[in-house]
Image (cartoon, rainbow, N blue to C red):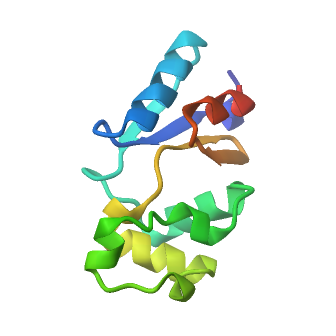
Amino acid sequence: MRAHDHIVIYHNPACSKSRGALEILREHGVDFEVVEYLRNPLDEDTIRRVLDLIDDAPADLVRKDQNFKDLGLDATDFTEAEQVARLLAENPKLMQRPVVVRGERAVIARPSEKVASLL
């Protein structure tokens, strides 16, 4: 694998979709790095890079779950990359998972099978 093909999965072991994407990577026999982003939160620069690499809107990287509601947040405040990067750096639990990056492309692997588009 070439250096620019390095694969990183931003993983939450408690998430079934994240575990599923990990399994797909293993089944394909590719080398990859696992970053448990709740233990090692991403900084704003890394989050901005991910946002640049995914085809989805920045808002799609934010989980609008109970944690989001408990923080009293409004989804309309988190549509731009800078807003999302700041929010996720401060609240890693709100990042959609898993995110898989390969070179200059990335996917939010929901469903897990979306990771195959990078392989």
Q: Residue at x 46, y 32 (%)?
A: 33
Front residue of 75 and 84: 75
Q: How many marks?
A: 0
Q: Is residue 8 above or below residue 94?
A: above
Q: Is residue 38 above or below residue 23?
A: below
The quadrant of the rendering that contains the N terminus is top right
Q: Residue at x 51, y 29 (%)?
A: 21
Is residue 57 left or right of 93 when viewed as pictured? right
Q: Residue at x 59, y 64 (%)?
A: 60
Q: Residue at x 49, y 38 (%)?
A: 9
Locate residue 19, reporting x and y percent.
40, 29
Locate residue 94, reporting x and y percent.
38, 64
When asked about the image quadrant of residue 112, the answer is: top right
When asked about the image quadrant of residue 56, the answer is: bottom right
Front residue of 5 and 17: 17
When asked about the image quadrant of residue 100, the answer is: top right
Is residue 12 left or right of 101 when viewed as pictured? left
Locate residue 35, reporting x and y percent.
38, 42
Is residue 24 left or right of 14 when viewed as pictured? right
The quadrant of the rendering that contains the C terminus is top right
Q: Is residue 10 above or below residue 79?
A: above
Q: Is residue 73 above or below residue 67?
A: below
Locate residue 72, reporting x and y percent.
32, 86
Is residue 68 left or right of 111 when viewed as pictured? left
